[in-house]
Image (cartoon, grey):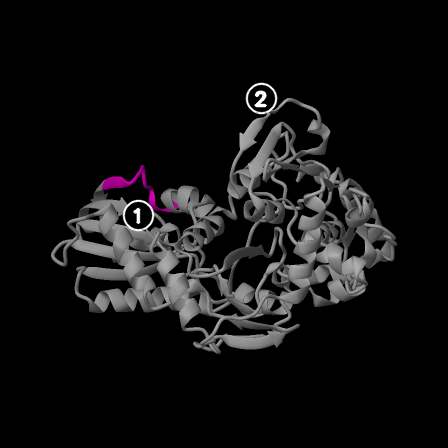
Amino acid sequence: MRSLVLIGHGSHLNGESASAVYRYAEMIRARGLYDEVVEGYWKEEPSLRQVLKTTASTDVTVIPMFISEGYFTETVIPREMGLGHQGPVPPEGVARVLGGRTVRYTLPYGVHPSMSQVILARAHEALPDASPEDTALIVLGHGTTRNENSNKIVYQNAGVLRQTGQFAEVHALFLDEDPKVGTWPELVKAPRVVVVPFFASEGWHTLETIPEDMGLEGPVTTFADNPHGEQTVYYAKPVGTHSAVADVILHLAEEAAGASTSDGDTERAHDAAWTTFMDRAREGLRFGEVMVQPQSGMFELRHALDEGRPGHELQTLVTPEGVRDQTRRDEGGHHRPVHTLRNMPRGWRAVLDEGDLMRAVQYLYPAVIEETYAHTCHTLRPTPWATTARRQTGIYARVQKATPAQVEEVAADVCSGCLRTRLWAGDKLPQTFFSGVPGAIPCAEACTFLVAEVREEVAGKRGGGSGHSH
């Protein structure tokens, strides 16, 4: 049995941030090469601290879904996942044994050598007849002065594509460092110019910043009075959304350090948690804001407040992904990065078989089954706030200065709308939904949403208001 974990950044504010990771997980899952494909996030759930608990196998490969090496891949992800590694990741990746699981952690997919072919594919989509006689290629990166590895891969890919001789010129330009993208008219001489954003996903930069900085009016823009004469720019889609990235991810996984020649075993604690959950589900179960009822060999999942409503009055869902997409926003259309906030939308029902029910529940309440079962077995170890705060780096190191009163003030606002009981703050949870109390769910550690809100409080930028609005 083998598990593949894709790690994305995610967002507390933007529900579309995780879309690319979901898409690749679905593509790889459909190929059937791994027993499961799991997603984890820095700013959403399951969090980096939780995601390994959600894997069913003792054989786990972790792929950072980032376009370049840098702070997140070298510091945040290894630290939060407990990999015992900091700094640049070697080409073969890092292998560790953690709690009975063999965990392999690779370089981000964006640095794989085959990404140059993805850039080329994007260029030819934008301009099929690109030629070395009259076409320049711009590989456009984000860039940053904070980490030199951020631009390294952009320069490397530009160099590789320059050597192919398929373009008259190949330039590496950046948004946030020199040479900046706005200087392209002075640098590029060819009459036709293909611009390929070396970005992980479609977003604000690719849709707004880059077109504005370059003066683009759409996929094709002609500039009549540039320094080198008339030039036409062909603007490609970002490399990170190309379907070939799924192949890059699989190559990384196959090349990972310590890759096993035989499958791993079923992880015992995970298996026990889900076996117990399914035993309860077959009898009918309420947990969190939902209820599960067995139904003619299948299972119906719905919001508990919709109990008794005729099925024809509810939107019927038939896939785990349908449940995921239906519940990613509250009824006001706001993104739900914390799934245990009491703001799950109503008005739907899902009819699923056993395997799909388990996956749907994982989407609804990531890591809740595993952590709640561990709590009932007295094996869930809370992490006090002080320990969480000391672990923070970068812009979040500021939370180390928060007073207990500040933490409690923010928690009173954010956590009051959550189903979880704050074990990390010393609260007690004598029963759980496994013993018939639907809303009894443990919280072993302050979530990244609370950490972010405490940072705002310390900075004096927090305006208050319920966590429901985020």
> Which numbered disc flags the more N-terminal residue, 1 or 2?
1
Of helix, strand and loop, which one carries label 1?
loop
**What percent of the width, then of the height, locates residue 404?**
86, 56
Q: Is residue 364 above or below residue 32?
A: above
Residue 319 within the magenta-colored segment of the rendering: no
Q: Amino acid at mark 1?
A: Ala
What residue is at 53 percent from the left and 76 percent from the top? Answer: 95
Q: Nearer the viewer, residue 117 or 321?
A: 321
Is disc 1 surrounded by few (<14), some (14 to 19) or many (20+) residues within 10 Å?
many
368 on left or right of 403: left
Which image quadrant: the C terminus? top right
> Would you name the residue on which mark 1 appears?
236
Q: Residue furthest left?
A: 133
**What percent of the width, then of the height, locates residue 266?**
59, 66
Residue 221 within the magenta-colored segment of the rendering: yes
> Would you name the residue on which mark 2 appears?
312
Q: Which residues are magenta?
A: 213-222
Q: Nearer the viewer, residue 454 or 182?
A: 454
Q: Nearer the viewer, residue 285 or 417?
A: 285
Q: Nearer the viewer, residue 370 or 83?
A: 370
Residue 189 visible somewhere in the drawing: no
Q: CA distance from mark 1 to mark 2?
A: 44 Å
What residue is at 45 percent from the left and 57 percent from the top? Answer: 176
